[in-house]
Image (cartoon, helix red, strand yellow):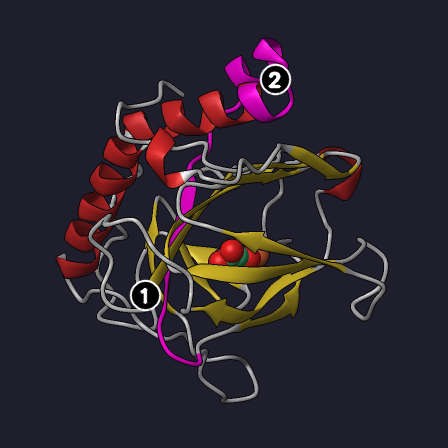
Amino acid sequence: MASDPDDGALELIPRPRRRLAPGVVHVPGWLGLTAQRDLVEAARAWARQGPGARRATLPGGARMSVETVCLGWHWIPYRYSRTRDDQDGSAVQPFPGWLADLGADAVADAYDDPAAGAAYRPDVALVNSYRGDARLGMHQDREELAPDPVVSLSLGTACVFRIGSPHHRRGPWQDVELCSGDLLVFGRENRLVHHGVPKLLPERDVPRVGTGPGERLNLTLRVSGLSG
Ligand SMILES: O=C(O)CCC(=O)C(=O)O
Ligand SMILES: [Fe+2]
């Protein structure tokens, strides 16, 4: 991703890119400030449209603490729909072509594999907003029928991102800090890795990207493998 001129000042201590496990790559500061601000603005517009973002209800009746708006396919625990069945039933918002292009760049960069990037056409995004004590329990992203990687982009307040293995929901796991602008890709043999967000790190400085006080936004891009 092209960097923009005021990015360097924020990275006083450079954080190197890291391969956390086979197919799992963390690229700190992948998005420049302008791109971060543009994405936050886009996320605000998506959350204003129609019935807006919502805290999804889990099958047991509990509500998630994270607020989500979906693009392309609407995710309801644990399935996809073209309509917002747990809201007003309206059609899900379209998945923009420019976001698919961004996802393709992300995969190409993270895997250092232009062909993998060119082949990547995500058609689902979950745009998650975390505030206060919001967190996300350990889970797998497994409602998709396609094997393609998941691209995650973080904006605003930093968090602890916990990543384990595809085989066990409990540890061992690694805790990684995801900061504004960071890219994380998980795919290949770790496409079904267990992961979650146990807490936000609001004490961290956050670049002014347009998120609310203490707010973290995360976009996950996925290939549904669904048609229709
Ligand atoms: O917020 C994050 O970093 C992860 C989000 C996530 O795992 C999901 O939406 O399935
Ligand atoms: Fe996930």
| Residue 209 higher or lower than 52, as above or below | above
Identify the mark nearer the N-term, 2 or 1: 2
Q: Position of residue 152 (x, y in %)?
A: 50, 44
Q: Position of residue 62 (x, y in %)?
A: 49, 88
Left or right of 107, for residue 179 = left
* Alpha carbon separation for disc pair 2 and 1: 32 Å
Residue located at (80% from left, 35% from top): 22
Left or right of 201, for residue 3 = left
| Residue 149 higher or lower than 214, as above or below | above
Left or right of 43, for residue 148 = right
Quadrant of the frame with the N terminus: top left
Of residue 163 and residue 70, the one placed in the foreground of this image is 163
Of residue 167 and residue 86, the one placed in the foreground of this image is 167
Name the quadrant containing residue 108.
top right
| Residue 162 higher or lower than 25, as above or below | below
* Residue hosting label 2: 116
Q: Position of residue 71 (x, y in %)?
A: 33, 47
Residue located at (44% from left, 83% from top): 63
Q: Position of residue 8 (x, y in %)?
A: 37, 30
Find ligand 2 in the image and state its quadrant.
bottom right
- Residue type, mark 1 in image: Glu
- The magenta stretch is 109-133
* Residue hosting label 1: 215
